[in-house]
Image (cartoon, rainbow, N blue to C red):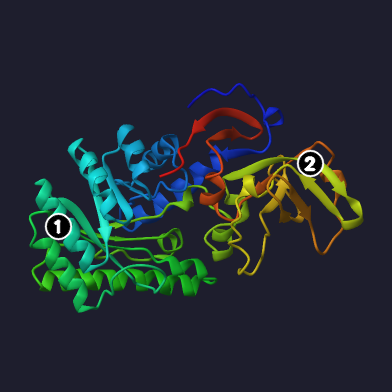
Amino acid sequence: MTTSSYKTIDELPTPSLILDLDKMNHNIKRLSDHIGGLGGKLRPHVKTHKSIEVARKVIEGGNVGGITVSTLHEADYFFENGITDIMYAVGIAPNKFAHVADLMAKGCDLKVVLDSQEMARQIAQEGEKRGIAYKVLIELDTDGHRSGACPESDELLEIARTLHNSKGCELMGLMTHAGESYNCRTPESLLAMSRQERDRTVNAAKRFAEAGLPCPIVSIGSTPTAFGIDDLEGVTEVRAGVYTFFDLVMSGVGVCSPDDIAISVLASVIGYQKEKSWAITDGGWMAMSRDRGTANQDVDYGYGMVVGKDGQRIGDLKVIQANQEHGVIGDPDHDLPYDDLPMGGMVRILPNHACATSAQYSKYYVVKGSDVIGEWDRINGW
């Protein structure tokens, strides 16, 4: 941890990205205990935090085997910082084959994913040409959310055979991401989605076994389903990422409360529009991102929930509008409590989407209470 020249939150510039160390450690322990209690292992997704300091805390939390990345830039960074077991969980493309091969040559145990016969043929040919065996998992579509092959399809087995029969690839198994779990609103719906993700993936692995195909890795996961799952039989690993920080979308799903959210944006009150019952801050959408992930949930938090500098809630305040560098604090149902929003004072804004908000910054100011105890760098880009 880099020592900060700032001693307290009051000294920080605004907007700044604040990371509450105690809340983060609690979140890490919570999922580690849950997955460990089911006899499982985590392959945590680092795309939310993109920080080796946070990754080390996650690994210290236990029940971790390898990490998941969303960019090859992340793979470079975490490999350079000593983590070798990495899954690149975005569908591979030919313009990245050389980059993957370079990481493998340096000793990175890098696994890639794909979901089509066309891409399987291309990477198999590339591996044969290079004289290497790319490690490949096939992505499954278990919920109609995004990409992936159908777990029950003939095509899935055809893709697997193409990979398995090529000297340019090593078939490593199956992975899926139940992104539709973000639309769950009740424990019952979340449990059903979690079981669906597990069952369709495990059944696909059984199809591999019946066809004489290897499937050493059976990888499932999203933050909601990781907390929702009740049995991991047949699963080798669970992937989740945003749980380290949580956010308002996860609160809307029901896997945390706003009080669990470990990151916030520190902003200053720079003006009032009292006839509109508004307070203006220097935390606009460049500070928060444009993510409006709570708009379709039961509670719409605008561009983020507003709490005090100490992290304590102030009524139902939220950022109701945002321009590039200006945020508008309001409460549609009540007059603003201006005494809690003094001119020149500070507030903290809890994000809709931790990944998107964190991506606006190059570092975290790590705090315990009101004390700034250090600074952790993070990476961005591809």
Q: Find residue 269 and name its label.
A: 2
Q: Nearer the viewer, residue 130 or 150?
A: 130
Residue 114 appears in view:
yes
Please state which amino acid type lies under the numbered disc 2: Val
Measure the C-alpha gap from mark 1 to mark 2: 57 Å
**Helix, strand, or loop for circle 1?**
helix
The residue labelled by disc 1 is 124
Q: Residue visible at 44% across and 42% down?
A: 50
Depicted 8 relative to depicted 90: above or below: above
Amino acid at pointer 1 = Ala
Q: Who's the residue at 60% across and 39% down the image?
A: 17
Image height check: is 327 above or below 201? above
Looking at the rendered structure, the secondary structure element under dot 2 is strand
Q: From what the image shows, is residue 132 above or below residue 187? A: above
Residue 149 badge: none
Q: How many marks?
A: 2
Front residue of 138/36: it is: 138
From the viewer's perspective, is 344 left or right of 163? right
Instruction: Kindly identify the residue that appears in the image at 46 percent across and 68 percent down.
Output: 181
Indicate which label's residue lies in the foreground, 1 or 2. Answer: 1
Image position, residue 26 (x, y; %): 50, 45
Residue name at image x 26 percent, y 43 percent: 99
Q: Can you give x and y, in whole percent of width and height, for residue 195 in the image?
A: 36, 71
- Residue 225 appears in which quarter of the rendering? bottom left
List x then y, in percent, for residue 205. Answer: 20, 68
The crowding category of the residue bearing disc 1, from other C-alpha atoms within 10 Å (few below 14, some 14 to 19, many at least 20), is many
Viewer-closest of 121 and 134: 121
